[in-house]
Amino acid sequence: MEYRQLGTTGITVSAFGLGVMTYGGQTPQDDAMRQLDLAFASGITLFDTAENYPTPLKAETQGRSEEILGSWIATRGLRGKVVIATKVAGPNGAGMSLDYLRGPNRRLDRTNIAMAIDASLKRLGTDCIDLYQVHWPERAITTLGRSRFSQVAEDPVQISIEETLDALGEWVRAGKVRAVGVCNESPWGVMRYLKAADQGAAPRVASIQNGYSLLDRSFELGLAEVSMREQFGLIAYSPLAGGTLTGKYGSDPGPIAGSRSSDSAAFLSRFTPERQKAIAAYTQLARDHGMEPAHMALAFARSQPFMTSVLMAASSVSQLESNLGAIDLAVPKDLAKAINAVHDAHPNPR
């Protein structure tokens, strides 16, 4: 396993991390514990969760992912050997409602952040969170996961990035948080965070967690340059594009029992004609090079110069065992060139 620096914090994380968003939901605790043991034994030290997990998001299971992760760390005596990353939820929006999580007026303000951190610390059973991330912004960002900009009405009540960062800074200064990060952000948003840090006593953003995969390389079009020049790396989620890059769905895709696809009503929407063409091309390319499609996708993501860590996520131990085959896999120059050729023919298909 390769290890990398988390921004300029001095914290070291594994080049592959484990996302535990299904733990306590689709993944029961005993299976989650086996996955965590396997991941750590394979060299993974970064474990990523959020206050609103597990998925599917439900009031009755909210917080269970943090609890399971915290229980595993405590029972194995690993607190000084792992990096805990969790997140504070932003406000409701885009048809999403998490009113059971601090009510309908949840914001990224000082009060909400204090309540969220305090609750996460208790569920995780720790006195310090290594990486605390803003899960999504106050404002609507209409370019993430889309091919064009759409203008939407701004919420007249909105907490500024400066206020959010200042509130996070209080917890860093108190020793309850080691580093802060953002998720699902744009170049404009990240630069505002960095500017606020440079002008005051607030901490600099150490990482950004956005989606990145062979089917979605939009991070490269603006955020990659900011990331490399400003020394904060990408923690990539969904590197297998919701499982579509595993090659297991074939030419006639449908939900597979026991996988996350079986719980997603929107699953089949991932297989548009354009995406199917790209998936088929990447699948064939991997097999032509003697690789599993999932291994190629994971290894390619890890090879990017702006990458800090690539988050694996699995519904079962067997899925994780398979994904771990990518840990030490190199991407030769000729394969990288061929991957880019497929991307150029099918850029970020929707």
Image (cartoon, helix red, strand yellow):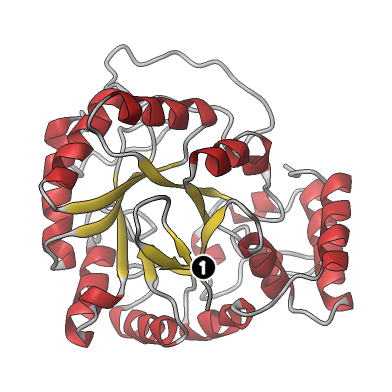
55 sits to left or right of 235:
left
Image spot of residue 251 (x, y percent): 82, 66
Residue at position x 39%, y 50% from top?
8
In this rendering, is residue 178 above or below 108?
Answer: below
Image spot of residue 242 (x, y percent): 59, 60
In this rendering, is residue 116 above or below 307?
Answer: above
14 sits to left or right of 47:
right
Q: Quadrant of residue 113?
A: top left
Residue at position x 39%, y 68% from top?
46
Residue at position x 14%, y 59% from top?
121
Q: Which residue is mark 1?
A: 15
Q: Quadrant of residue 159?
A: top left
In this view, the residue in front, 207 or 103, is: 207
Image spot of residue 180 (x, y percent): 31, 46
Classify 10 Å Cα crowding around label 1: few (below 14), some (14-19), many (20 and above).
many
In this view, the residue in front, 301 or 34, is: 301
**Does any portion of residue 310 appear in the rendered image?**
yes
Type of the residue with mark 1: Ala
Residue at position x 54%, y 53% from top?
265
In this rendering, is residue 193 above or below 168?
Answer: above
Image spot of residue 311 (x, y percent): 50, 64
